[in-house]
Amino acid sequence: MAKSEDSFRQALSGKKIPVLTLDNKWHQLFTQAETEIPADVRRGEEKLNDLLKRQGKLTTESKEIRKLKKKLMEEIMEIADAAGGNPDPKSEKKMEEKQRLINECNQKLEDYADELKFLPAEIDKVNYRLMLTTMDICYRRILENTRDIDVINDWVKNVRIEIKKNLVRKDEREKSNFDLYSYMHDIFGAEVIEIFDMKYNPEEWKKAREAKLAKKAAAGNPGAKKG
């Protein structure tokens, strides 16, 4: 593991852990497009779901058995009442059969109760193990993401430096063009733009540059009054 299991166990001490496979946020950890669900997580998920299904099935069946037992007991009472305390062999046979079914119900309820008594502890055990696995996966992903973030931050920092350098170079080239244009303009006039196949009007660049410098100066001295 990327971090010792003891560290995770200490972090979980005293914490109430939700049943992970019933927690939508837990599922979202493993439903990202770039994420492949690890085999140990799949196994833990399947085992936990099986235990939960078994618990639900036993609880539901126990309720149904209790209903059946109650119905059988009522039927025995009805047969006894109809016989007036002196049931005939046919009635006795019916009562014995129903009593047999009641005994079966009692045995099933006892067996189910024993299993239901131990299931919560087994569910907690599997759920706890799955949480440790989840914590390990999250820890490793956070480390990996942090490394990527650091690499990207360095890249962005270097790109910003290059952008600043290139902006300075661009401004120097544009100023050089303007100086060259100004000299040639004095000789040839406005036709110099066509003569030298200039793709932009240096005069427009000069106006834009002056406006930019004025805006920068105003930002640096917000209290200055305009003339």
Image (tube, helix red, strand yellow):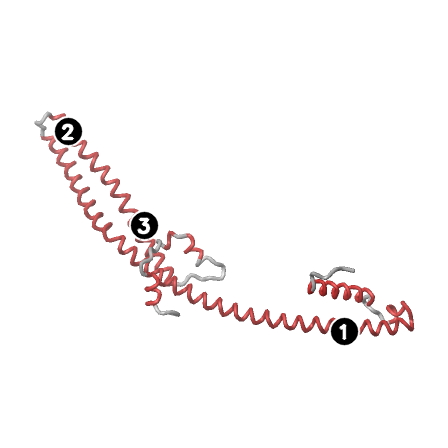
The residues bearing labels 3 and 2 have C-alpha atoms spaced at a distance of 39 Å
**SS of the residue at dot 1?**
helix
Vertical position of residue 1 compared to residue 57: above or below: below
* Quadrant where the C terminus is found in the figure: bottom right
- Crowding near pointer 2: few (<14 within 10 Å), some, many (20+)? some
**SS of the residue at dot 2?**
helix
Is 197 placed left or right of 143 in the picture? right
Of residues 79 and 60, the one drawn nearer to the viewer in this rendering: 60
Vertical position of residue 19 compared to residue 188: above or below: above
Of badges 3 and 1, nearer the viewer stands 1
Q: Which residue is mark 2?
A: 79
Residue 207 appears at what percent x and percent y? 80, 64
Could you tell which of marks 3 and 2 lies nearer the N-terminus? 3
Q: Amino acid at mark 2?
A: Ile
Q: Which residue is mark 3?
A: 53
Q: Where, by quadrant of the figure, is residue 93 drawn?
A: top left
Of residues 21 and 73, the one drawn nearer to the viewer in this rendering: 21
**SS of the residue at dot 3?**
helix
Q: Amino acid at mark 1?
A: Arg
* Quadrant where the N terminus is found in the figure: bottom left
Residue at x 78%, y 65% (from the top left corner):
210
The residues bearing labels 2 and 1 have C-alpha atoms spaced at a distance of 111 Å
Of residues 113 and 225, the one drawn nearer to the viewer in this rendering: 225
Q: Which residue is mark 1?
A: 173
